Amino acid sequence: MEYEKCYVFKPDDPQPAKRRRTEPQGLQSSWNLRKKAYQDTWKAQQDRIDERLRTINAATINNIVGFLEDVAVDAPKERIPTGLIIAGPNSALRTSIAAQISSQSNTDRRRSYTQISSSSGSNLKSLLKTIIQKVTSRTVEDDEDELEEQPASRKGGPKLLNYDLELLHLYVQERRIEQVVIAIEDPEACDGGLLSELVELFSYWQDRIPFVLLFNIATSVEFLQQRLSKTAIKHLDGRVFDAAVSADEVEQVFDSLTTPEASLWIGSNLATMILDRQSDYIQGIESLVQAARYAYMSHFYANAVSIFLSPSLELEDVTAQHLEAVRNLPSFRNLARQILDEGDSGRLRDLLDNDEELFDFAKARVQEGKQGLAKILEATEVVRCLQTTLPNATASSQPRMYVQAMSGKLAGSPMLRTLLLSLRKAPSDTAIGVVNYLLERNKPEDLTEQISPIATELEALIQNQDDTAQPLRSEEDVKNSTLRTTVIAQKVELSKQKSTLSKQDAAYTTIIRRLSDVLETYLTEKLVNPKDLAFHEIFMYDLKSPFREVFTPRPRHAVERALAAPHDYLDCDCCGPDQGEGDDVTLASSQPSTAVLYQLYLESGNLINASDLWQAFQAVVGDAQDEQQTMALFQRGLAEMRYLGFVKNTRKRVDHVAKVAWRGL
């Protein structure tokens, strides 16, 4: 091999044995169907989310597109046109501003849209290199036959560096580009000096390259102005655009996730965790979408019975193992007990023995369950309607109302009883507003059919009242009650006495009580506990553990626990706590060297003497091995401790290492 450049490898068996291809068996046989169902379900859900986001930011995007058109016609010669978009820390515009603007821009102008962030470059050269590379790689309005790579320099001229803006100037001339739009996602995270240098450099090339800047501001314009130099500010010609409030975006996206058309519903526990995480951390709206997508993926990929969510599912596609898994669902067992209590044992026998009967029954009940969840959602809108129209009532957000309803705690809650009592005490002008609001929405239909005759009677009563200046009041109204004072044995007693009602007030009391009873009956029937529905494990996902491990991981806790208790992860008896020399000793020579060093590290101070640490390590591990192997293990373990960030070198004492992290922080 010292002089040969290559050699021919001739194995003894030139034809390796073929690997036997095994088909998925049992519950895994439905993997392809579940994958297809997930893709179709999430695609429909993603389309609804995108449509809702386009609706939310449509006004802002149209204003920005109009701004680009205006500066294209009459652009300032000495300053750079700049759009200051105040979108908040977690707006949907934060990470997709260039894509949304380019999709809404339906003009014949040739523009180049480029989006950069604080991580695009650490200095001016790297940032310019990134911008030039993104702009020259693709132009949105170019035809496909024009997307060929352009030469990096003039023909016959000197070769230009990859961060020279002359490259961009040549590209703009050859492609006849009218505007180079550069959107900066997070200007607050960029270095102020670097951003100022970039703006100043762009201003020097503004007569040759038509730059337009878009700053996506998460804080305020004043804060951005403080971070830029005075020279850079003089070169900017800005216009401010106010985007939608981030809280409204979260509510709108969550509303699109919980539409009646959804095939999979998110449970209350998981929904609470997603919403709390969205409010506690500064994250974009895309984080909420990704969290919902991971929930969909976890359900379809890990739950074999999710195959019943496929609309084109046939009995031949379902194996006996899937039907057996359906029979072992907790909700089916509860349903079986209910059927037995009703005395229909023959029906239950068919579901247990006949696969075709169970298949049809499960598909029908899954559809009924999803319709039941849609009814719950309609009932929450009725509750929010009462909160909006009744005085002294606070309207809850749609996500929080959804969480309460999906947890089964909304029906019969004190909040609901208070709303119905307020409705009974409401005057006629408030009651007619509630009724008209429900009828205008025309949802739910079964409720509007019951309210329509009540609304007709109420309107007729209001039109025929004697005193039109004062609204009609019910018997429960405080103004129809008087306090009566009675003195008995030198003690004053107060008693409440109802005033004499007029004939019209008595009729109004009857009507408002009927309305309250109708709403109470409707809400009691519709606001059921979703976990009481049969086969809710199929159409509802409410597991927190996989979601928490992915979106709120605790890597430091996991590392510390693994080093402190390695036997829990290695699943061996040799590393157990009872292998030490005493009852309270957890050190053992059979444990990994890094785990031994970590436990010695916990007992040390801020500065650890390397010689003392070596002697302690040798006392634990050295009995079973020679000194050379023990030293190798010690050096490797100490290197891993340094890699994990527990120790570092110190200049104070060469023969010591400094403690960097403490347990539990």
Image: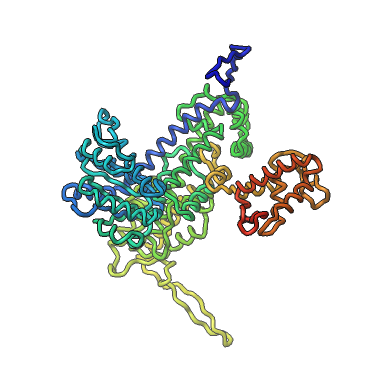
Q: Nearer the viewer, residue 319 or 279?
A: 279
Identify the colour scheme used. rainbow
Quadrant of the rendering where the N terminus is positioned: top right
Instruction: Residue at 38%, 48% (x, y): give it.
Output: 117
Q: Residue at x 55, y 16 (%)?
A: 7
- Asked which quadrant contains residue 223, the reply is bottom left
Vertical order, 109 against 656 (above or below): above
Question: Is there any visible trace of residue 251 in the rendered image?
Answer: no
x and y, in percent, of residue 510 in the image: 41, 60
User: In the current view of this chain or complex, which residue is farthest to the left?
Assistant: 74
**Closest to the observer: 422 or 363?**
363
Location of the C terminus by quadrant is bottom right
Q: Is residue 74 left or right of residue 195?
A: left
Q: Nearer the viewer, residue 508 or 22?
A: 22
407 shown above or below 497: above
Instruction: Give the vertical position of 455 relative to 539 (above or below).
Output: below
Q: In the displayed orientation, state which residue is furthest to the bottom.
A: 490
Question: Residue 351: horizontal and vertical position, in percent?
Answer: 59, 29
Answer left or right for 315 relative to 113. right
Image side of residue 606 versus residue 399, left or right: right
Residue 119 at least partly seen: yes
Q: Residue 450: where, in percent of width, then height?
A: 39, 49
| Residue 565 horizontal/vertical position (percent) | 71, 46
Above or below, 316 against 235 in this view is above
Outermost residue toward the right in this view: 582
Q: Residue at image x 30%, y 31%?
A: 149
